[in-house]
Image (cartoon, rainbow, N blue to C red):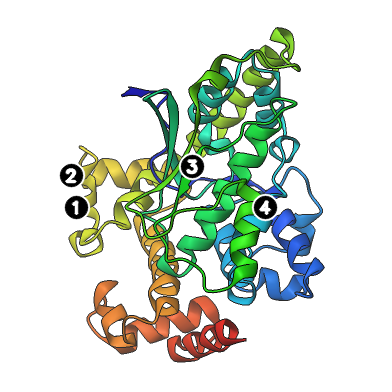
Amino acid sequence: MTQLAEPVVRHWDFPRGIASVCLLVRFGAEHGIGEREMLDGSGITPGQLADPAAEVEAHQELSVVRNLAARLPDAGPEVGRGYHATTFGLFGFAFLSSPTVRDAVNFALRYLDLSFTFSIPRATLAGGQVRLVLDDSLLPPDVARFLVERDLSAIRTVIGELLPTGVPLAGLDLRFPEPSTVDQLETYREVFGVRPVFGRPANLATFDATYLDRPLPQANPQTVAFCEAQCRELVTRRRRRAGVAHEVREHLTRFGAIARGMPGVARELNMSARTLRRKLEEEGTSFRALLDEVREALAEELLVSGALSVEDVAIRLGYAEASSFIHAFKRWKGVTPASYTRHHTVSRRN
């Protein structure tokens, strides 16, 4: 088995452009969901939607996804069809201008943090097929299926735009249970060109490896070189801004990391607590601010899943007492955890 380029990121928590959120809001509007409802809880303003240069954090887009999925839980494949190569700006133009499909796929994996994906893709070659696995192990359970199906559909759409004939799938496995309606099964066939096999160990799409070395009709060495230079500059800026703060966020999402506090996270990052504090100050933030941010995001995910009580969520997030968690949550969201949970439970039912 041969590995194509390794994805440059292993977690979905990276900054991203506003284009994906705009697409989600438009899709919601087409299905009767207002902009205000779509942006609820995300911290994204209408002004940001109007600014093509605006950037958002991953958890902000995740809030918009969650709002859409609460109303249209089966819409993931249809939403993904709206992500064309041009949706991704310079990243997409570099993709289209690559010499071959292989070059385009490798470019996408090297600059994955310029995409809008939440499911981390890995591509390998085996038995004359390209095997594209989408890892959903780090996704919030309540939107995992929606995101995997959206991301798979988007990948298929963009890869299909590389060649006039498209790149047909040979097969599609999904970890999730088979939908109960004939209409939904027909949507899968229409979007993916094949009927998925459900309840499989992994989310796996396969296509014939001979497509990898097909020359692309829009290949242009000057264009791809220019776009890659611009992508490199953009991703360097974003990664520099994410820096140590991004690593701290990523560590804090791991089980038990919150309880270990700053000394524990500093040890995991191979530095002293004093050095970590200084580096975060240089990036304009602090361990306390990042801890608050991660707690807020995890609290939303744990409460919406419905699997834990408020008291259990408080314990998971490192609070000595539930009352301290409730006070913090009201500061973040303006409502109690119980009210927040009820609101999202009603939204899912409707």
The image position of residue 261, as x and y in percent, is 22, 59
Query: Given this view, does label 3 or label 1 mark the residue nearer the observer?
Result: 3
Q: Separation of disc 3 and disc 2 at Cα?
A: 44 Å
Mark 2 sits on what residue?
267
Above or below, 324 relative to 5:
below
Please state which amino acid type lies under the numbered disc 2.
Arg
Residue kind at label 1, given as amino acid type: Pro
Mark 1: which secondary structure?
helix
Residue drawn at point x = 71 percent, y = 28 percent = 165
Residue lying at 64% horizontally and 12% vertically, measured from the top left: 99
| Amino acid identity at mark 3 | Gly
Q: Nearer the viewer, residue 289 or 72?
A: 72
The amino acid beneath tag 4 is Glu
* Residue 117 x/y as whole percent: 54, 46
Indicate the position of residue 339 as horizontal and vertical percent values. 50, 91
Q: Are marks 1 and 2 in contact (CB under 8 Å)?
A: yes
- Ranked by sequence position, the earlier of labels 4 and 1 is 4
Q: Residues within 10 Å of mark 3 (few under 14, many from 20)?
A: some
What SS does tag 3 mark?
strand
Q: Quadrant of residue 324?
A: bottom left
Q: Which mark is residue 92?
A: none
